[in-house]
Amino acid sequence: MVVAIDKLERFFRRAGAIDVDKSDLGRYEAFVNRKLHDLLIRGEATAKANGRDIVQRIDLPVTKGLQECLHHFEALAAEVPVRPALEEIVARPPLDLAYDVELEAWLPELAGGLSVAIARSFRIVDPEVKNPSTEHWERTFQLFDLLL
């Protein structure tokens, strides 16, 4: 996991010009899984509303901003290969409906898009931040909870 920590630290420096440390990565992992779960719950509701018994990728409410972060993640992942680390940390919470195979395979990419979004959000919360404090994390979580 040390290699994964190093790659995630490099990823955050590239994505948001911030430094995270090992203690931040626990908060980060909890954030990613909480937001993935929120998106999956909304996707499940969409699938049910459309009379399907499987949640597909198209069911998730991916906004324009998150889509842009997904594109940025693809470019960054070519420089800093973090996908294996994301595959390791991404939880797949049980839903009432099953996951589509494509959706399941896409979850680490979605986590990558959320990762870019949170990395960039720290600079919005505090333009001078270099190493986010607990307060920065909490404010950023509140922002995401409001919007996603």
Image (cartoon, rainbow, N blue to C red):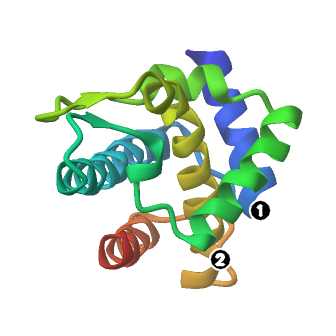
- Quadrant showing the N terminus: top right
Say above or below: 86 vs 9: above
Tell me whether the residue at label 1 lies in contact with that at label 2, contact meaning CB atoms closer than 8 angstroms: yes
Residue placed at 65% from the left, 68% from the top?
120
| Residue holding disc 2 | 123
Which percent across, then down, holds residue 106? 54, 33
- Quarter occupied by residue 18: bottom right
| Left or right: 35 as drawn, with respect to 20 | left
* Amino acid identity at mark 2: Arg
Labels in figure, total: 2
Q: Residue at x 46, y 42 (%)?
A: 57
Q: Position of residue 77 (x, y in %)?
A: 78, 36
How far apart are the two marked residues, 1 and 2, measured between alpha carbons? Answer: 8 Å
Q: Which residue is located at x 39 percent, y 72 percent?
A: 135
The residue nearer to you, when weighing 116 against 62, is 62
Looking at the rendered structure, the secondary structure element under dot 1 is: loop
